[in-house]
Structure formats: structure tokens, C-alpha cells
């Protein structure tokens, strides 16, 4: 008796496995031939499926935009590194040219009739009441 039960159980297990395989084949067949699109579950959840598709598109677009911004930032950082020595050199040159002694030398070279003042500047204070 126990032998028969074991045989039946093996047969049931075999049938269960073959049913799983046929179910998988049927699901694959339904997807390929498009009949899954007419399934009531699919039709009733169509707005949610569209929403998920929209979120997926937004996710992909956001990822693309973020990568584009990262590339742009790296490019600008590289450009900044390249221009920084030039800015330092220009600033140094400007500081050198704006020294009082350098300005006086340039005035003499250009033969301009400007002379350097030896007196400090005077601050003129005007009372507001005197203006009115």
C-alpha cells in the first residue's frame, strides 16, 4: 500500500512539474502573441502601467541630465585650472605696473608734462548746511 502511495506521489510530483512547464510556456506564448494585452488584469491596471512607464522615462532623462552636468562641471574645472596661472601672471603684471615708481618711469618715457606731487592729498570737508 505504501508503495502505491509513493508511486502516486511521484506521479503527482511529475504532473505538477509538467503543469508548471506548460504554464510557463502558456505565459510566454501569451506575451509573444499579444493576448496578454487583452487580459482583464492588464487592462484594469493600464493607468498604473503608464504611470510606471512615465516614471521610468523621467528616471532615464534625469540620469542623462545629471551625467551631462557632471561632464560640464569637469570641463569647467579643467578650464579653470588652465586659466589660473594666466590670471596670476596678469595680476602680478598689473600690480607691477601700478607701483608709484613704475608710473613715474612711464611718465618720463612718454615725455608727458605730468609731475609727481610731493604733498599728500588734502581732504575737503563741506558742511551740509553750507550747501543748502
Image (cartoon, helix red, strand yellow):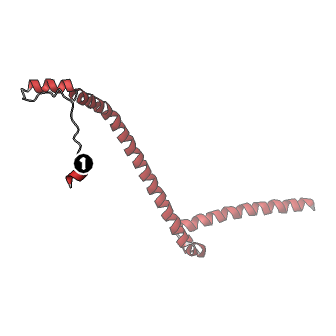
Work out which residue is located at the far front of the displayed protein and give it: 130
- Callout 1: few (<14), some (14-19), or many (20+) C-alpha neighbours within 10 Å? few
Q: Judge left or right: residue 9 versus residue 19.
A: right
Residue at (42, 45) in percent of width and height = 70
| The N terminus, quarter of image | bottom right
Which quarter of the picture shows residue 12? bottom right
* Percent coordinates x, y for residue 38 in the rendering: 55, 75
Q: Mark 1 points at which residue?
A: 127
Above/below status of 103 relative to 125: above
Q: Work out whether residue 21 or residue 79 is closer to the camera in this orientation and state it.
A: 79
Q: Judge left or right: residue 124 versus residue 4.
A: left
* Percent coordinates x, y for residue 23 in the rendering: 66, 65
Residue at (21, 35) in percent of width and height = 122
| The C terminus, quarter of image | bottom left
Residue at (18, 24) in percent of width and height = 102
Q: Judge left or right: residue 85 versus residue 5.
A: left
- SS for tag 1? loop
Residue at (9, 24) in percent of width and height = 109
Amino acid at each position: 500500500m505504501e508503495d502505491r502511495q509513493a508511486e502516486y506521489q511521484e506521479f503527482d510530483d511529475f504532473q505538477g512539474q509538467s503543469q508548471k512547464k506548460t504554464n510557463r510556456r502558456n505565459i510566454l506564448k501569451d506575451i509573444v502573441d499579444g493576448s496578454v494585452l487583452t487580459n482583464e488584469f492588464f487592462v484594469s491596471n493600464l493607468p498604473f502601467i503608464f504611470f510606471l512607464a512615465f516614471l521610468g522615462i523621467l528616471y532615464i532623462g534625469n540620469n542623462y541630465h545629471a551625467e551631462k552636468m557632471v561632464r560640464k562641471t569637469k570641463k569647467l574645472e579643467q578650464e579653470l585650472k588652465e586659466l589660473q596661472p594666466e590670471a596670476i601672471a596678469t595680476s602680478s603684471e598689473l600690480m607691477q605696473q601700478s607701483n608709484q615708481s613704475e608710473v613715474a618711469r612711464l611718465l618720463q618715457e612718454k615725455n608727458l608734462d605730468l609731475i609727481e606731487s610731493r604733498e599728500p592729498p588734502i581732504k575737503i570737508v563741506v558742511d551740509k548746511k553750507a550747501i543748502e
